[in-house]
Amino acid sequence: MMLANYPVYTMLRAADVGRARQFYTETLDLSVAYDMGSVFGVAAGNGTIISVYQRDGSRAPENNAAVWQVDDIDSVARDLIGRGVIPERYEMPDVEFDDLGIATLGGARALWFTDSEDNILMVTQM
């Protein structure tokens, strides 16, 4: 399985991404790994990242339980679909999905799917 070769991290939602950024950087003293405004990541141990995104009123994923950072999302998407995974498509402003179910979000691309327990999982390429 392709995902066994990629690191996984968590992605948390925030009602106020500025307040969350302050908590993670000041209270927990974690450094910012990336910042795209409404989405940011803080570095944790061994190269892991906690990502936090602004939750709005759109029909977006409620919470990504786990996120894999990959280098070829198209290949990973084809592999997952070949294994029976059905990509999720969410209604979000300014987000379009391609034929594989991959969304383009600014400079990143993402594929969402659920596990057997309805946890939302994500594969992303930045």
Image (cartoon, rainbow, N blue to C red):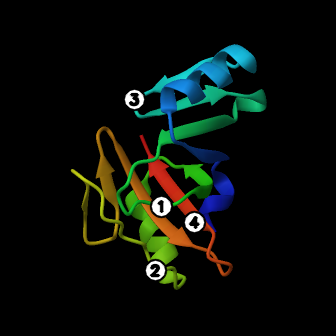
| Residue 107 image position (x, y, % from top left) | 31, 38
Instruction: Tell me the tag on residue 36.
Output: 3
Residue at the spot of label 4: 120
Question: Are discs 1 and 4 less than 8 Å apart at CB?
Answer: yes
Seen in the picture, residue 126 relative to 60 is either above or below; the reply is: above
Give the left or right position of residue 64, taking residue 98 as reference: right
Q: Counting residues from the N terminus, which is met first, the one under dot 4 or under dot 3?
A: 3
| Residue 101 image position (x, y, % from top left) | 34, 69
Q: In the image, which is nearer the foreground, mark 2 or mark 1?
A: 1
What element does badge 2 sit on?
Answer: loop
Give the left or right position of residue 81, taking residue 104 as reference: right
Q: Quadrant of residue 116?
A: bottom right
Quarter of the image where the C terminus is located: top left
Instruction: Tell me the tag on residue 86.
Output: 2
Answer few, some or many: residues within 10 Å of disc 2's Cα (few below 14, many 20 plus, some between 14 and 19): some
Give the total number of marks visible in the rendering.
Answer: 4
Q: Label 4 sits on what residue type?
A: Ile
Q: Counting residues from the N terminus, which is met first, the one under dot 2 or under dot 3?
A: 3
Residue drawn at x 39%, y 28% is 37
Q: Counting residues from the N terminus, which is met first, the one under dot 1 or under dot 3?
A: 3
Answer few, some or many: residues within 10 Å of disc 4's Cα (few below 14, many 20 plus, some between 14 and 19): some
